[in-house]
Image: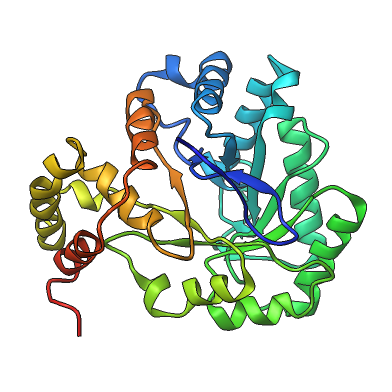
């Protein structure tokens, strides 16, 4: 069962699993990329309890937000049934901006506001439930970034603000300048990328009583690779545990492992296949025994606990 969680004391309520739209336009079968097909998939997710959509300005070469908007236009009433998360701050050379020569970050107040307004326009919505600063910009002060976020909050264009890929110091600095506290940090977190456990990110989230969002919960697909030593060790342990957890698959156990962490990460699902989305939903009901959780940790690390 997909539960709902308030991600921060001052934050929105999101579904326990989040549908990620990074690759929704990459499907080899273009029939799966039409506005109607996308809307059908979003509705199928919502029917399963996955009501939170994650996107970003840069996704699909700056085309995904517009694709989402075109899909939502087919049924405007559906907007009220979902929460939309988007991100801004990464700018690369592309067909829309051939004048750009070097990929860079820009989270100045003016740029954040301009990007948010473009996201609103492209998606055809009147507010963004959560806007994330996609990456820290080393040339912009925290005061400047906060000024843009604070203005968007004041104007009602975004309901809440957060960050993505920030370390604990960058988070604390920006948060100290916010009129309304940041509500999440979206970071890479999986069995094959445990940095949030080790670098203090997950602890910081617990201290602020905010829930992190976890991108690439399957290690960017690495977990399924036959030639990756760490992945193979995890695959073997997962195969041994499968019967104990009612035939759970490798990806289900990987999601269950992530969701068991006390920081309560919200995993972002990155597949275009409904059957895999259905499978992930079952992972929300798996409660790993402590030794099994550590057994998967040990397999991923290649050694026992210190």
Front in this rendered view, residue 106 or 254 = 254
Task: Describe residue 131's horizontal placement relative to residue 194 as left or right.
Answer: right
- In the rendered image, which quarter contains the C terminus? bottom left
Percent x, y of residue 234: 15, 56
Front in this rendered view, residue 234 or 72 = 234
Total labels drawn: 0
Percent x, y of residue 202: 48, 71
Q: Residue at point 47% right, 79% down?
A: 200
Percent x, y of residue 65: 63, 36
Furthest-right residue in this view: 155
Front in this rendered view, residue 78 or 125 = 78
Residue 140 appears anywhere in the view? no
Residue 156 appears anywhere in the view? yes
Which of the 4 image quarters holds residue 162? bottom right
Which of the 4 image quarters holds residue 75? top right
Q: Residue at point 56% right, 52% down?
A: 93
Which of the 4 image quarters holds residue 103? bottom right
Task: Describe residue 199's horizontal placement relative to residue 40 as left or right.
Answer: left
Q: Residue at point 62% right, 64% down?
A: 163
Coloring scheme used:
rainbow
Front in this rendered view, residue 94 or 4 = 4
Q: Residue at point 69% right, 22% down?
A: 78
Position of 161 relative to 97 (above/below):
below
Percent x, y of residue 61: 54, 42
- In the rendered image, which quarter contains the N terminus? top left
Position of 90 relative to 306 (above/below):
above
Task: Describe residue 299's horizontal placement relative to residue 6 as left or right.
Answer: left
């Amino acid at each position: 069962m997909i539960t709902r969680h308030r991600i921060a004391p001052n934050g929105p309520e999101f579904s326990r699993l989040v549908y990620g739209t990074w690759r929704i336009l990459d499907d080899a079968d273009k029939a799966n990329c039409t506005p109607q097909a996308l809307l059908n998939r979003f509705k199928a997710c919502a029917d399963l309890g996955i009501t939170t959509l994650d996107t970003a300005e840069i996704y699909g070469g700056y085309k995904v937000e517009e694709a989402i908007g075109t899909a939502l236009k087919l049924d405007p009433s559906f907007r009220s049934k979902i929460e939309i998360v988007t991100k801004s701050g990464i700018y690369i050379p592309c067909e829309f901006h051939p004048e750009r020569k070097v990929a860079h970050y820009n989270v100045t107040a003016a740029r954040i506001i301009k990007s948010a307004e473009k996201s609103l326009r492209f998606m055809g919505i009147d507010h963004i439930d959560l806007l994330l600063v996609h990456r820290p910009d080393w040339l912009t002060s925290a005061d400047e970034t906060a000024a843009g976020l604070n203005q968007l909050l004041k104007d009602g264009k975004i309901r809440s603000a957060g960050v993505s890929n920030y370390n604990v110091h960058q988070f604390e600095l920006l948060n100290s300048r916010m009129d309304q506290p940041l509500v999440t940090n979206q970071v890479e977190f999986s069995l094959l990328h445990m940095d949030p456990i080790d670098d203090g990110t997950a602890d910081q989230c617990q201290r602020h009583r905010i829930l992190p969002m976890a991108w690439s919960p399957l290690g960017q697909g690495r977990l399924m690779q036959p030639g990756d030593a760490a992945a193979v060790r995890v695959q073997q342990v997962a195969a041994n545990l499968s019967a104990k957890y009612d035939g759970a698959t490798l990806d289900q156990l990987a999601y269950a492992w992530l969701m068991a962490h006390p920081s309560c990460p919200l995993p972002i699902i990155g597949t275009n296949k409904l059957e895999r989305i259905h499978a992930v939903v079952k992972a929300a009901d798996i409660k790993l025994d402590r030794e099994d959780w550590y057994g998967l940790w040990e397999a991923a690390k290649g050694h026992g606990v210190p």
